[in-house]
Image: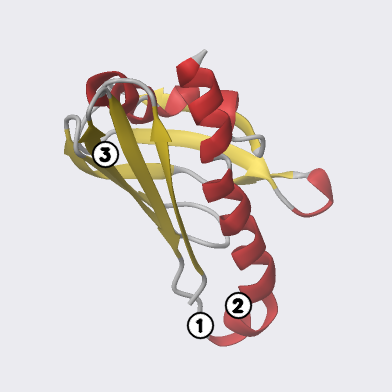
Amino acid sequence: MPEAVRTVRINRPAADVFAFFADGENDPQWRTGVKEISRNGPIGPDATYHQRIAGPAGRAIPSDYRVTAYEPNTHLAFEVTAGPVRPTGDYRFTPVDDATDVTFKLSANLSGLKKLLMSKPVQQSMNSEVAALDRAKQILES
């Protein structure tokens, strides 16, 4: 099962950091693979997003998702509901003095032919996604 996890410390209060990540429409600022994204309804539990991300040969592929956990300033999670791979994601926010540790975890359950053909590219994509936390840190600290 492809999985990636990363933690970064962002020098901002947890409320500010959580608000940035809770609004998926901020994603194109720090996730380079997001081609388009729009939220359906308000930010919060069960929010859904229509998203298209960069796929093979640069073509955009669907990757819509739904927020599955929304605990202000501490926890945010989602599940992808459209596209060839449907990972789950989990953010944890931990206050540390005047900063916030953000842990971002992605995992995908692949089976059959998808597991055989897609495990390596999915792993690479997930590694890239969690590494993008560095870009979010730069944005939030500037």
Residue 51, position as x, y percentages in the image: 53, 36
The quarter of the displayed image where residue 21 is located: top left
* Residue 41 to residue 131: above or below: above
Q: Residues within 10 Å of mark 2 (few under 14, many from 20)?
A: few
For disc 1, the marked residue is 111
Q: Nearer the viewer, residue 59 or 123?
A: 123
Mark whose residue sits in front, 3 or 1? 3
Q: Amino acid at mark 1?
A: Ser
Q: Nearer the viewer, residue 82 or 10?
A: 10
Residue 3, position as x, y percentages in the image: 48, 67
For disc 3, the marked residue is 93
Regarding mark 2 in the picture, which secondary structure is present there? helix
Q: CA distance from mark 3 to mark 1?
A: 31 Å
Do callouts 2 and 3 mark residues in contact (Cβ within 8 Å)?
no
Residue that appears at 77% across and 54% down: 56
* Colouring scheme applied when the structure was drawn: secondary structure
Q: Nearer the viewer, residue 118 or 113?
A: 118
Q: Amino acid at mark 2?
A: Lys
Q: Given the current orientation, which residue lies at the most extreme left position?
A: 71
Instruction: Decide which of tag 3 and tag 1 comes sooner along the chain.
Output: 3
Regarding mark 1 in the picture, which secondary structure is present there? loop
For disc 2, the marked residue is 114
